[in-house]
Amino acid sequence: EEWKSVTAKIDLSSPTISASVTPAANPAGWNNVSVGVVFTGSDTVSGLAYCTSSATLAGEVSGLQVSGDCFDNAGLSSTGAVSVSIDTTAPSIQYARTPAANEFGWNSGTVTVKFTCADNLSGVRACPPDVYLVGEGASISTSAKVFDFADNSKSISVTGIKIDRTLPVSTAALAGTLNNGWYNTPVTLTLSSTDTLSGVLQSMYSLDGAAYAAYQQPVVVAADARHTVKYYSTDKAGN
């Protein structure tokens, strides 16, 4: 009988497998767009038969384990997995200002703008710090932006803040016949006030120590005496 042979092919090693995500997650482990998961493998003995098909994930998830398998031609398999986190929703941001404006919409000092941020999935990465508005103006504004760990962001604008720190300016004028430092006729007192920003709210005066009264029109003083008038004005910001 002639010699005969038989061949036995043995592969006892499972294939290797790796999983990749495209696009890659950011350093915090998050994506903010749909991702594709691809499984690749190799086998140096019997060769690779097939791997689990690639998958596309579009919804929002946190730490979802996506697994797949690769098989070699000997029927051996390996399983691989990758964690996927997707957040496509921007964080929220709100603000509050203190102190509140007065009834005329004005402040007479620094206004603090405090921001509050929230994110229900990846979390807030950076909420803007407080902003202190110190300058004067009739329409002061500022803006801020919040980021979550998936790199989503949202901006907010703060507008229409009015700050007037400057006191109004008041002057008094006396009208009458003056002779040697004395008036020999009734004297008319006229008050004038200016405020270039918030505007004059009212002027007040006190004659000879009496209670202050609102100035509405020129005041006539006719009694013999040495009279003293005190006066001041208030602007709409409360200065």
Image: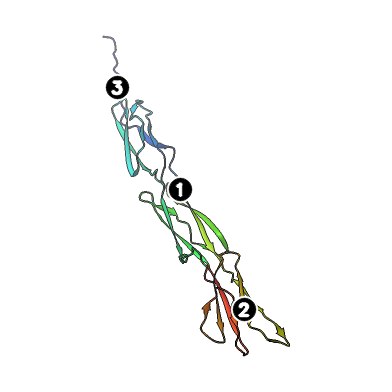
147 vs 177, nearest the viewer:
177
Residue extending farthest to the left is: 1
Check contact, mark 1 vs mark 2: CB within 8 A: no
Read off the residue under disc 3. Answer: 8
Q: Which tag is nearer the camera, tag 1 or tag 3?
A: 1
What secondary structure is found at the residue carrying circle 1?
strand
Residue displayed at 61% across by 87% down: 227
92 vs 151, nearest the viewer:
92
Figure colour scheme:
rainbow
Label 2: few (<14), some (14–19) or many (≥20) C-alpha neighbours in 10 Å: some
Residue 153 circle label: 1
Q: Which amino acid does the dot numbered 3 rest on?
A: Ala
N-terminal of the pair, mark 1 or mark 2, is 1
Q: Which amino acid does the dot numbered 2 rest on?
A: Leu
58 vs 207, nearest the viewer:
207
Residue 189 circle label: 2
What secondary structure is found at the residue carrying circle 3?
loop
Residue 7 circle label: none
Residue displayed at 31% across by 25% down: 73
Residue extending farthest to the bottom is: 225
What secondary structure is found at the residue carrying circle 2?
strand
Alpha carbons under labels 2 and 3: distance apart: 123 Å
Left or right of 140? Residue 78 is left
Q: Which amino acid does the dot numbered 1 rest on?
A: Ser
Q: Please tell me in which quadrant of the rendered image residue 202 appears.
A: bottom right
Quadrant that contains the C terminus: bottom right
Q: Please tell me in which quadrant of the rendered image residue 84 appears.
A: top left
- Numbered marks: total: 3
Alpha carbons under labels 1 and 2: distance apart: 62 Å
